[in-house]
Amino acid sequence: MTHLSRNVFFALCILGNCTSLKAQELWGASNSNYAGTMGHDLNPASIVACPFNWEVHLLSADVFAMNNYLFLRKKSEAIRKSYRGEAIDEDRIAIRDKQDDKSAYVSAFAKLPAFMYSNQNWGLGFHVSSRMAFGVRGLPYHLANFMKEGFDFKPQQKIDYSGGNARVAALNWHEAGLTGGLTLNKDPSNFLTAGITLNYLFGLNGMYLLVNNLNYNVQADTLWQIYVANVEYGHAVPGAANSGSLFQKKGSGFGGSLGFQYYKNRNQEAYNPCPGKERKKKYDYKIGVSIIDVGRIKFKSNASTFAFNDLGTDWFGIDTVKLKSIGNTDSTFSRQFFGDATASKVGSNFPLWLPAAASIQFDYALSPS
C-alpha cells in the first residue's frame, strides 16, 4: 500500500467511526488570520500583512438559510432526506404562529479559482465566484399561512385582512473581482490596513415582488375577494416568453466592498511558522470594519415588469387555478384583473441591488498562538 493510500485509508477509518461531526459557518472561518482569499469577502483589508505571502484557491462553497416562520423539529433528518431525494415528514415541520411579519434569507456561493499575494506593505488578489441570494421581508403572517396551507385554511376564512410593505427578491449572478489593499500605518502599536474589492457582475436570473397594499378576504377555498391591490413585480428568469435559458446573461452591473483593520500592538515575529520555544501573541486585539456587497445589476435582456395599482376582483374558482410557468402566471393574473393577458406589463428592464451589509469584526488574543 502506498503512502497516499495509507493516509486515505486511515482518514476513512476515522470518519467511519464518528457518530457526529461539527463544522463552522463560513463567516466564523473568514475571521481567521489564515483565511486567505476567503477573508476578503468579509473584509478586503485582510489581504494586507497576511502570515503567508501568497495563496492559490481552487474551490469552496457555502449555503446559508434562515427564517422566522417555519422550523424543523428534532430528528427531522432534513439534510439526509434531501440528499436522498426523500420528503420531510409533515409532522417534523412546525410553524411559528406569532402574528408578526415574516422574513427569510437564503444565500449560496461557489468560489472558483482565486489568487492572492500579500506582504507587509500591500496585497493584491483576484477571484471568480457564482452566487445566489433570496430574501423576504415584511410578509404578513396571514399571507404566509395561506401560501403554506392553501385557501382551504378555515381558521383564516371569512376574515378581512390587510397587509403592505412586503418585499421579496431573488438574484443569481457570476462575479469576477480584484481586491487590493495597503498598510496605512506601519507602527506596530497602532497597525492599520485598508482594502477594497471591485467586482464585475454577470447577471443570470432575477426577480422581485413589492406588495405595497393588499386588502382581501378568503370567503371560501373557491373565492378570493381582493378589495384593493397595489402590487408590482418583475422577473428575468426562464419560463416566460423569450426568457432565455437559466445560464444566459440577462443583465450586468458593478459592485464592491471596502474595509479597514486595526491591530493593537501587532508583533510580526509571532507570525513566524517556526517560533521556537517561546510563543508570543500576534497582537493584543484586532478590530475590522467593512461595508460589503454594495452594487446592483440592471436586467435588460428577457426582462419584464408588471403593475397592479388600486385594483380589485372577486376571484371565483381560485382553488382550481394552475400556475404552470412564469409566463402562465403573468397572463393569469393580468387576465383576472384587467381582462387582458398582457395589460399588466409596464416595462422591460429593472435593477436589483446586491444584499449589502455592514460588518464589524473583533478578535482579542487571550493567549499566544
Image (tube, rainbow, N blue to C red):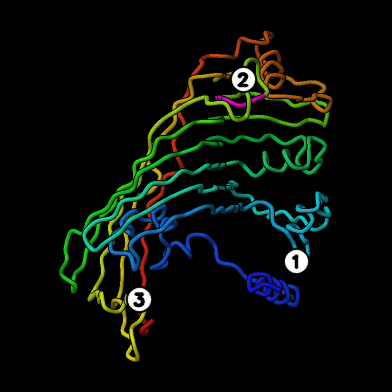
Q: Residue furthest front?
A: 2
Residue 10 appears at what percent x and percent y?
69, 76
Label 1, label 2: how far apart the Cα atoms are: 42 Å
Q: Nearer the viewer, residue 340 or 212?
A: 340
Left or right of 28 in this view: 367? left
Is residue 36 rendered magenta in the image? no
Q: Nearer the viewer, residue 25 or 113?
A: 113
State the image quarter where residue 242 is shown: top right
State which region is magenta. 232-238
Residue 334 appears at what percent x and percent y?
66, 15
Q: Quadrant of the N terminus?
A: bottom right
Badge number at residue 74 = 1
Residue at image x 75%, y 57%?
Answer: 78
- Are dots 3 and 1 in contact, CB under 8 Å? no
Q: Nearer the viewer, residue 79 or 11?
A: 11
Q: Earlier in the sequence, mark 1 or mark 2?
A: 1
Query: On screen, 290 above or below 350?
Result: below
Badge number at residue 243 = 2
State the image quarter where residue 297 is shown: top left
